[in-house]
Amino acid sequence: MTSNAAPHGEERRVQPSAAATVDGAPIAYVIVLAAVVAALSFVPIPISAVLGFGGTFPLSQAVYPLVGFILGPWAGALAAGIGRVIGILVAPHTASTGLLSTVVAIVTAWAGGVLVQKKGSLWVWPPVVWALAFVAYVGRGLTVDVSLGLALASTLVNWLSILLWLSPLRALVRGWIADQSPARLAIGLALGSWIVNTGSFLVANAMFYNLLSQWPAIQWKALIGVSPVEHVFRAVVGTVVGLGVILGLRAIGLVKPAKAGY
Amino acid sequence: MIGPEFIVRVEDLSYQYPRSASPVLRDINLHIRKGEFLGIVGPTGAGKTTLCLALNGIVPQIHGGRFFGRVTLAGLDTVETPIHRLAQHVAMVFQDPETQLVTNSVEDEVAFPLENLSIPREEIMRRIPWALRAVRLDGKQAKHPSELSGGEKQRLAIAAALAMQPEVLVLDEPTSQLDPQGSHEVFATVHELNSRLGITVVLASHASEELAEHADRLVLLARGELVATDTPARLFSQAQWMEQNALRPPQVVTFFQVLGKRGVRVPTVPVTLAEAIHTYAALRPAIEVRPPLSPPGSEKTLPDGVGSFEGGVSSRERPVALSLQDVAYAYPDGTRALQGVSLSVQRGEYAIIIGQNGAGKTTLVKQCLHLLEPAAGTVMLNGQDVCRLQVSEIAQRVGFVSQNPDNQIFTSSVEAEVAFALRHLGIPKGESQARVEESLLLMGLTLWRKSHPLSLSKGDRARVVTAAVLAMRPDILIFDEPTTGQDYAGARRILGVSQALHRSGKTVLVVTHHLHLMPGYAERAVIMGKGLILLDAPLRVAYHADEVLRSTHLLAPQIIRLAQHMQAIEQMQLPIMTPEELAACIRPRPQSPRHPPPGAAAPPVATGGRP
């Protein structure tokens, strides 16, 4: 057989071992990414404290969307959930909402996985979830001491992410994440991480505000400045980590999870 | 034709990795008998690892890609059968042990696959000590795998596979990080499993001497194709195949082939040491042996064709580049890795540090780089205490290529990796680019400059790291096992670069187990064992210090062991280091019948060293 000749053997249909996958993602990938989430849960980021607002948040928050981009919606949600639970148990000081923060991990990774799906109607649901969280959070605020204008300003980036999700940008982001160009991949990761994280954070706010602590109006004001910075930080970290991981995964040629977006 | 005795059948196998432009294996047809010991040889990139991975379904079930043909193992199709079912029949030891160690203790690591196979507890408890003893890890049951040296990790991975006592054991360069004695023992252990338990062994390796000794049959792969399959004796004696595929035959093969060119009639070229001793005995009436003129360690030149006895004497007069004085270090688990080590390396010297796995070689190197703080003693770099130097200052003076190249890879392209440190050192862009070009060229990486480092083989990744270090142009270069995982051509290329740097005045330190590769490159050998320096001597003296070598689980290269046997018979000193040097000590007796091959008459073949 010369280098250009067709192989003599019959081509076989290749698929990942069915016994070891979750929604098309090899179970080993789920375990590895759960471990990454757990490890990053131990690293508290003091951005909020630096800005004079509250304490820290765990670095793992930055990679929840990435977990979804790599594994797809359901396997991503599983990996992020398992990783976050382990992270909370080992480093409870990084979870101000305790085990409730697992819900945010699951929703964010799931939304990340949904974002990169080309087919199906699953894309409808993340904005529905976010919108319900928005209503629960802002609605509750309005019943206490927050004006509508302040509530909308405070959640500007959050509801903006819902609008961006519903716009054609979502399809563009999906295409950029799948693009072979590192530059376009980076843009896709940055925008994708920002939209998914910012939208899903409404769930965290809704849970915290309704179940744990109703912060005063002055805190809503502070969030106008703090929230965008935090979300940009998460998107930057997600992009840096994601770029290396995805380029590496492409380079080593391991089988790609069925619902992966890269 | 294909009988039931074949446990592995590879039929028309072609395989292409995802995103790869061409197949890495092409139309491979191979049948492996039950109980056979099959060796796979071939240069880097020949497809050896991929063929190994195809035997247990990892290719294509984990890697994806395009798979043509059929591979069956114990009657199971490796594309259709889940990997966990195949694992009941086949165990694998990967080239990089880091990729397969998953538990928190040595004992658990060996137990893990057995537990997954539902082996009864009593049997697991019986197999653990057996497997650990087989690889010399007994007594380390409680250690965390991360606390083991590179070689120990590799032996642990082998122990975990051995414990499974599978029908087929696939090993991909299992001894590349082992000391020579460890390598010898692993081959012996695998051979025992093969001969006593009937386990079929498939072993890819560059270790020609060991394969010649143990394998029933060899498969030669090149550029993804099966070039030849034959017995070690027939395959290794085919000089043309060896040369074309940049393979190194066992040293005794080279020796007898050179003898043949010198007019000595060698009826059959032996491939093992035992056969060589036998052949030599048969040849004795027809040959004369004359000792080299100069004693070991001398700088006097030997007769033509014998090369020179290079020593380290003149180097003693050069200024000191690196020195350790009474350095001691113990790891947190209490392991005393260095016990009062003193060593002085002169500027422009080329020395090797050798010793068993866990002897303290890498720890010593880390002290030189101040990656570890000495518990006692001082480490001086060009007269300055390394503890007082910034990491960046040390990095500019000492280039370090670590044992595991992946520890030093950060970026997403080969070119960016080589330029990485230069950018952070503030080297101007033009000069930086020139240095990158030079380094890529030196290491033969120009074609892969845009590739992601992780898409390359481990041997190639080591070359990327070497190129990155070279680009910094440090005065001292330390290579930790630079030839591990390299084929003969790759190893020669790296050592050639180290030699060129040495000739340009750089100080070179090489930690290595590949003693057979170093003559012609290094001047001096530091032999370590259990955290101590056992011998610090010119290379030639060290290679013949048999007792010291054995005390630290090293074996002298095969040709030196043959020379030692000849010394005992001939009652003369033969302080040689290479097959060519030994052959130059031998000539046909004038009265004996001579059958020189055409054109191979008189002058002895040159060289004491390789390049």
Image: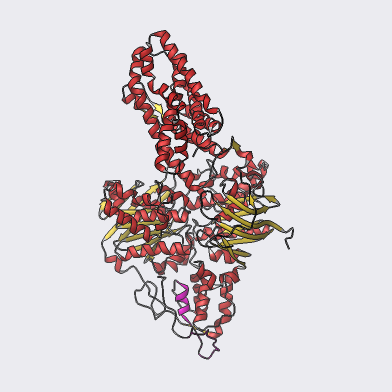
Between B60 and B484, which is closer to the camera in this rendering?
A: B60
Q: How many marks?
A: 0
Q: Using the rendered image of the protein, determine whether residue A103 is visible from the camera's viewpoint.
A: yes
Residue reaching furthest bottom?
B591
Residue at position x 36%, y 16% in the image? A220
Name the residue furthest front. A168
Closer to us: B77 or B472: B77
For residue A87, side relative to residue B120 (left or right): left
Q: In which quarter of the image is the N terminus of chain A?
A: bottom right
Image position of B474 with respect to B256: above or below: above
A61 shown above or below B410? above
Image coordinates of residue B120 in percent, x first then y, are: 68, 42
Looking at the image, which residue is at 56% across and 85% down? Answer: B285
Tell whether B270 sits left or right of B603.
right
Q: Give the range drawn in magenta.
A: B578-601
Residue B578: name its quadrant. Answer: bottom left
**Magenta stretch: includes residue B556:** no
- Residue B398 at what x, y percent from top left? 32, 54
Q: Is residue B253 above or below residue A37?
A: below
* Prevailing SS of the magenta stretch: loop
Residue B342 shows up from this direction: no
What is the basis of the colouring in this image? secondary structure
Residue A122 is situated, as x and y percent measured from the top left of the image, at: 55, 28
Along the line of sight, which residue is nearer the eye, B147 or B449?
A: B449
Which x, y percent locates residue B307? 39, 76
The quarter of the picture where residue A27 lies is top right
| Residue that appears at 62% across and 61% down | B38
